[in-house]
Image (spheres, helix red, strand yellow):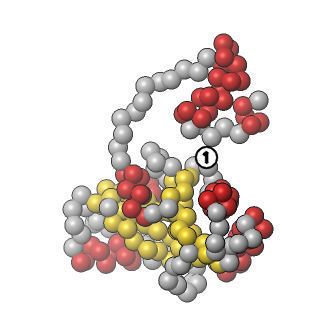
Amino acid sequence: MLILRGAPALSAFRHSKLLEQLKQKVSAVSGLYAEFAHFADVNDVLTSEEQQVLDRLLKYGPSVPVQEPSGRLFLVLPRFGTISPWSSKASDIARNCGLTKIQRIERGIAFYVEGQFSEAQAQAIADSLHDRMTQLVLGDHEQAASLFSHAQPKPLTAVDILGGGRAALEKANVELGLALAEDEID
């Protein structure tokens, strides 16, 4: 897997707005930087020409100065086992540009949050940075290799809601990672 840094992910306006939201939730937050992170699943080493083509393809985004990241990493990615629409399009474009060694490209956003905060506060920050239905948050770029894992589908599981009621649905919600909200369970 190749890991490639991208352009800053937030415009100046969105950056200041998100930083203010984070400070309201966790007052210890003192800074924020966000950049795109690209992950390429390759079946062979890219030549220097292929690497240059890939670098040009992944050069986009707002014209905000790139900076060296500092602070705690919150890497927001599509949930494992899914393929984002961005990935489908980017992978097709890469193949059409002759990058046949690339199986798939995926994109995430690396948020670097500065400040001293507890694990509970870090969880509150993570909750603010992603959509739990479609995304997950990691603390390390290397963990993103699971984006490209090919697991066997699990057998169909039935939940006896008529027999077990709300308790059965709540249990299935936790065990299966359904991420159902309280109003959806009701």
Residue 122 spot, x, y in % from top left: 63, 61
Amino acid tagged 1? Met
Q: Residue at x 54, y 57 (%)?
A: 137
Residue 105 spot, x, y in % from top left: 39, 60
* Residue 129 visible to an observer of this rendering: no
Q: Residue at x 65, y 26 (%)?
A: 169
Nearer the observer, 57 or 43: 43
Q: Secondary structure at mark 1?
A: loop
Q: Residue at x 55, y 87 (%)?
A: 65
Q: Residue at x 52, y 84 (%)?
A: 67
Q: For this view, does 38 lie left or right of residue 120?
A: left
Could you say which quadrant of the image residue 125 lies in? bottom right
Q: Which residue is mark 1?
A: 133
Q: For this view, does 108 lie left or right of residue 131?
A: left
Residue 113 spot, x, y in % from top left: 60, 72
Q: For this view, does 58 lie left or right of residue 174?
A: left
Q: Is residue 21 above or below residue 120?
A: below
Q: Is residue 80 above or below residue 161?
A: below
Residue 70 spot, x, y in % from top left: 53, 78
Q: For this view, does 15 lie left or right of residue 105?
A: right
- Which quadrant of the rendered structure holds the C terminus? top right
Could you say which quadrant of the image residue 152 lies in? top left
Nearer the observer, 186 or 143: 143
Which residue lies most toward the top here? 163
